[in-house]
Image (cartoon, helix red, strand yellow):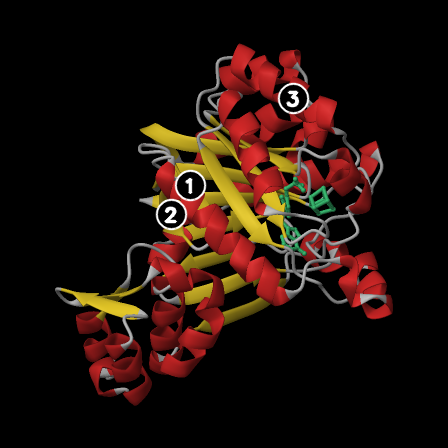
């Protein structure tokens, strides 16, 4: 079945590390955007297809009024056929949700909340220029629980200055007690054009160095394992029954459609990106449409496969004309148990998840 991604490119302000497509805009512009977005959904040439996951991401989707979210969901429901068990996720920031809004989200069929916590320490939140504090994180989680959501995910950032395993472990424990079932832990990246990049160029010790960050990540992964979490993708840990169905589609190469500014779709080996700026988007232009050739399909499969628990399908690569078993780097990694083979699939040993990029590059 298909998944749908909807991009809401608005935020209250820009966090110092973020290079995602998000802008600070006024209410009338936001309404204009939503009208255009709903029209894009309703005129989709994939009308009536069955959908089993919807992900409303951003930016900050929870910045919108509940009514605006309802309008978007109605457009989807009127255009596509929703599976009874459709996973519907919305990304929320702690300071833009309250109990009333959450109850409305629940009534519209939203059944998964992804909360952008980043850290439960005020000094970290200040450093990241987040608009919320720790108290708002806890209030948000209380309200999410009170509103009856049980599929709760949080995003955390790893690699902040002064982080330590004890500090990180403590925040995992606190969040677990608040009913969190899924953690996305991202190693902080210094992106071009961000305030963090300027700070880092001035003083690279403003964040944890790579070596310490990798070591912290490994300790955090082991702790999640001990707690019974499944490390099912490099940055994602879930209690049994709480993996993200939607994100799984991205990693396993299943089809999805993206609506909204800069949203990507992947359909029948074709990657389509909506325009990255509003003027082009409002003129229905695409940023690019690429039909992946064999070598791109091979690269894509290795890159995605080694990043998640699904692994790399050796037969599929053979069909595309690549006998990966003849790759000398692979032979070396198999000997060193960095990669292991089970039936006809290759998997990256979890211990090496944090250095996956180097290993993947050696294989393509
Ligand atoms: C694009 S945001 C959208 C969610 C929401 N607006 C928020 O910030 O909580 C999704 C996640 O990407 C992660 N992210 C953004 N910039 C990042 C960076 N430079 N390095 C690592 N993770 C980053 C953050 O953890 C964030 O929660
Ligand atoms: S991290 Fe989230 S809230 Fe911050 S600017 Fe990026 S999208 Fe917006």
Q: Earlier in the sequence, mark 1 or mark 2?
A: 1
Q: Quadrant of the C terminus?
A: bottom left
In front of the other: label 1 or label 2?
Answer: 1
Q: CA distance from mark 1 to mark 3?
A: 21 Å
Query: 27 above or below 136?
Result: below
Q: Residue at x 51, y 63 (%)?
A: 272
Q: Residue at x 29, y 76 (%)?
A: 336
The tag earlier along the polypeptide, 2 or 3, is 3
Q: Give the percent coordinates (x, y) of residue 6.
A: 56, 43
Does residue 352 lie above or below 102 as drawn?
below
| Circle 3 crowding by C-alpha within 10 Å: few under 14, some 14–19, many from 20 | some
Mark 3 highlights which residue? 138
Residue situated in front as seen by the camera: 337 or 111: 337
Query: Which mark identifies residue 231?
Result: 2
Residue neighbourhood size for the residue with mark 1, other residues' Cα within 10 Å, grouped as few (<14), some (14–19), many (≥20): some
- Is disc 3 placed on a helix, strand or loop? helix
Are dots 1 and 2 in contact, CB under 8 Å? Answer: yes
Q: Confirm whether residue 255 shows in the render.
A: yes
Q: Quadrant of the rendered structure where residue 98 is?
A: top right
Residue 283 horizontal/vertical position (percent)? 69, 56
Distance from Cα at disc 1 to Cα at disc 2: 8 Å
User: Where does label 1 land, which residue?
Assistant: 224
Q: Quadrant of residue 297?
A: bottom left
In the figure, is residue 32 to the left or right of 301? right
Of label 1 and label 3, which has the lower sequence position? 3
Question: In what quadrant does ligand 2 lie?
Answer: top right
């Amino acid at each position: 079945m298909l998944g749908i991604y909807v991009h809401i490119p608005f935020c209250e302000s820009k966090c110092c590390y973020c290079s995602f497509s998000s802008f600070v805009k006024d209410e009338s512009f936001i309404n204009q955007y939503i009208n255009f977005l709903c029209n894009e959904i309703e005129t989709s040439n994939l009308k009536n297809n069955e959908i089993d996951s919807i992900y409303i991401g951003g930016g900050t989707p929870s910045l919108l009024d509940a009514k605006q979210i309802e309008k978007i969901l109605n457009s989807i429901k009127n255009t596509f056929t929703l599976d009874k068990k459709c996973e519907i996720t919305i990304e929320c920031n702690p300071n833009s949700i309250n109990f009333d809004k959450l109850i409305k989200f629940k009534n519209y069929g939203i059944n998964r909340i992804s909360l952008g916590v980043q850290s439960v320490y005020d000094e970290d939140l200040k450093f990241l220029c987040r608009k919320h504090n720790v108290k708002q994180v806890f209030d948000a989680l209380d309200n999410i629980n009170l509103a009856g959501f049980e599929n709760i995910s949080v995003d955390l950032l790893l690699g902040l200055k002064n982080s330590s395993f004890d500090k990180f472990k403590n925040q995992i424990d606190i969040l677990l007690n608040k009913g969190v079932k899924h953690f996305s832990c991202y190693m902080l990246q210094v992106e071009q054009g961000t305030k963090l990049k300027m700070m880092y160029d001035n003083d690279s010790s403003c964040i944890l160095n790579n070596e310490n960050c990798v070591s912290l990540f490994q300790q955090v992964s082991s702790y999640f394992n001990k707690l019974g979490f499944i490390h099912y993708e490099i940055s994602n840990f879930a209690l049994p029954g709480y993996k993200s169905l939607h994100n799984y589609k991205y990693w396993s190469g299943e089809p999805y459609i993206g609506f909204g500014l800069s949203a990507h779709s992947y359909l029948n080996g074709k990657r389509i990106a909506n325009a990255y700026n509003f003027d082009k988007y409002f003129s229905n232009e695409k940023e690019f449409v690429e039909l992946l050739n064999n070598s791109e399909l091979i690269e894509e499969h290795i890159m995605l496969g080694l990043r998640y628990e699904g692994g790399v399908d050796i037969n599929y690569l053979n069909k595309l004309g690549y006998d990966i078993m003849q790759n000398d780097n692979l032979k070396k990694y198999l000997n060193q148990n960095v990669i292991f083979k089970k039936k006809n699939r290759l998997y990256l040993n979890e211990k090496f998840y944090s250095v996956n990029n180097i290993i993947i590059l050696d294989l393509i």
